[in-house]
Structure formats: C-alpha cells, structure tokens
Image (cartoon, rainbow, N blue to C red):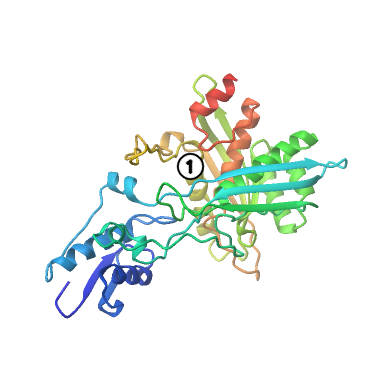
Amino acid sequence: MTEGQGLKVWSHTQGVFPDREAIAGMLAMPKERVQVMHMEGSGCYGHNGADDAAADAAFIAAKLPGRAVRVQWMREQEHAWEPFGPAMMIKVKSSLGADGRIDSWTFDLWSNTHSTRPGGAGSLLAGVHKAAPAMPQPAKMEIAPAGNGDRNANPLYVIANKKVQWHFLPDMPLRVSALRSLGAYANVFATESSIDELAILAGVDPVEFRLKHLEDPRAQAVAKLAAERFGWSKGFAFARYKNLAAYLALALEVKVDRETGRTRVIRAVAAIDSGQAVNPDGIRNQTTGGILQAISWTLYEAVTFDRTRITSLDWSSYPILRFASVPDSVEVHVIDQPGQAFLGTGEAAQGPTAAAVANAIRNAIGRRLYDLPLTRQRVKAAIGV
C-alpha cells in the first residue's frame, strides 16, 4: 500500500477481477486503486483460502502504508477456515413396470447454494470479521442449464414419470462454497446407486439395464465401451456431466477386508466422450485425476466439527487417499468425435466414481451403503448387520 498510488496484491486467486472488487469493497476504496496480480500457487477445483489470504494481506497493508506484507496460511488454518462443500441429503423413490422399465422416479434433494464465489466483501473472512463487518450476500437458489446444487439431479435416462425437486436451504452452520462438480457428485451417487438397485430388482445386468433406458447413442457408446474394456459390470456407473457436457462411464473392482471394513479400489476402467479430442492425453490425465480424487472423497474424506469449531485440522483428522491405496491400474478410453463440439472434461468423473465404488461395495458385501464417505467403519458395520 502506497500513499496516493493505491494497493497492489499478488495472489493465486482463481479470479483477479472478482477478488479486486471484493478487496476494494472491504477497504472502502475505489476499485481503480486496487490491482490484483495472479501468482502461481496451489490451486483447487472449487473455492479454497486464496482469496481470504489475499484479503488478510490487503487489510494489514492498508494499515501499514509503504510496507510490503506477506501472508501465508498454514495447513491447519486453511483446514479450519476455507469454505467447504455444502452438505446434501437426497431421497429417491422409484418403481418398475411390468415390462421391467422404470415407470416412476421421484428425486428430492436438500442443499443450499454451491458457490459463494465470486462475491463481495462479505465473502472474505477479513471482511466479515472486521469491526464494521461486511455482510455476506444472501444465498440464492439458482436454476440454470448447468445446474448448481441441482447439477445432474435430473437423470439422462428415459423415464415416463419423473419428478425432481431441490429443497433449497439458505443457511448452513459452516461456511460453504464450490467443491469440484458442485451438486453432481452427490446427485449422481444417489441416482446411480438407485439405478443399480432397480437393476437388481429387475434381475437384469446393470449395464444392460442402463442401456435399456438410454436413447442417446453417445451415452450408450461410453457405457458399452467401459463395460467391454473392463470385462464385467459389478461396480458400474454412468452420467453425462451437467447433462450437456462430457459423457463418462466407469467400471471398477474393489477389495473389501471383511475384518476391518477397509475398501480398496483395485482396478478402474473409464470411457469418456468429450466431443472432438484436441488433446487426448489431457483428457486421460483429467479423468484419471478425477477418478482418484473422487475415490478419496468417497472412501475417506469428511469435515468434522463440534458446536464451536472445525476439528479436522490436519491429514490425520482429515484423511485422504494415500499411495498405498491407489488402484493398481486406471484406464481411460477416449472416444474421439471429430467435428463435434468440445464438451469439457474436468469434472465428469466425480459422480460416476462415487456411484461405481458404492455399487462395487454393494456387490461385494451384499448390502447398500447410503451415507458418504463409505469409511471402513461404515462398511464394517454393514457387514456385521
């Protein structure tokens, strides 16, 4: 901060212009006097603490004109203070007709907004906690083609009688924002878990059952390819991300230790159609990374808290997938579509991976788990029922 010259901020924020506007609002400065310059740093799919660390530095610098200020959050601080993915609860009610097809589908989800970025000064911790606090903008329910908390709540399957409802919750006890894939992760998990249960009820192979309800030939193609390359279909899931982006099907195998409940994904095979494949290696890399990240979410990750604070402050209290638990192999088969629109790849794997893991565990132990993450304690409890 320099007298008369304004404020310069260097940050690995995902959006220099929204961050600039928020910092200017927090400091009651014209935004023309604030510069935010992007610096390389740890990134994320979603919303981490980068904007908040930048705001902390800006707030301190505003009180110390002419001094350079560097702020670095420690791991425990970011675990405690960054926004978290919103909680979701989903209820699915469906039935089969005499022809073995789904003849009714009711999908109810409860969640609040899945993005508080970009936001104003009220989206910054420093803005909220200063003496004259900036008020966060009220959470709004937003229905759009790409979806928010309702992303992928409407399945791509052809179902005669379908009802989908988002019960919007404006408030959460924890600070929430975007987590990679927004509502699609939980919505696809719930949808594809239900589809597998219906296939079991119908006495039909789960891939065959899905193909029976898919009319889009590109959707059918990824389902067939994943199943063929894997060799069987016990642990399978499909979704078209946002119902307008990449098609992805995934088959995987798990090993469940019945004594401890520990689950490990042994092998995963995915097929993806992202439109014209300009960079097939990039598609494979993004999809592989998405599968591994979603395995971590699905088997391990959960924020813990008590009535006063976050209690998962490190990698022990917030466990993630470690190298010893990474699958022996992950294959990604890209279906190129020359001349077709580019559909985007980065978040297509999250929902199908969660559902495929859940379906594989269901096949392994004979019982369905409904609450994420599918920890060894929950698997062990299901085995012991």
> For the image shown, how many numbered marks are present on the structure?
1
Nearest to the observer: residue 269 or residue 34: 34
Q: Nearer the viewer, residue 83 or 211?
A: 83
Q: Position of residue 115 (x, y in %)?
A: 47, 59
Q: Is residue 96 left or right of residue 72?
A: right
Tell me, yes or no, if residue 320 can be seen here.
Answer: yes
> Eyeballing the image, is 336 above or below 267?
below
The residue carrying mark 1 is 297
Q: Along the line of sight, which residue is nearer the eye, 338 or 323?
A: 323
Helix, strand or loop for disc 1: helix
Q: Residues within 10 Å of mark 1 (few under 14, many from 20)?
A: many
Residue 245 picture location, percent across and down: 61, 61
Q: Position of residue 209 (x, y in %)?
A: 77, 43
Which residue lies at the image location 57% right of the left edge and 48% below the top edge? 110
Q: Classify residue 191 as left or right of residue 7.
A: right
On the question of residue 153 being in view, the answer is no
Please identify the quarter of the rendering in which residue 358 is found: top right
Amino acid under disc 1: Trp
**Relative to 338, is 380 on the left or the right?**
left
The quadrant holding residue 318 is top left
The residue sitting at 67% across, 54% down in the picture is 154
Q: Quadrant of the N terminus?
A: bottom left
* Residue 258 vertical position relative to residue 108 in the rendered view, above or below: above
Q: Residue at x 52, y 30 (%)?
A: 263
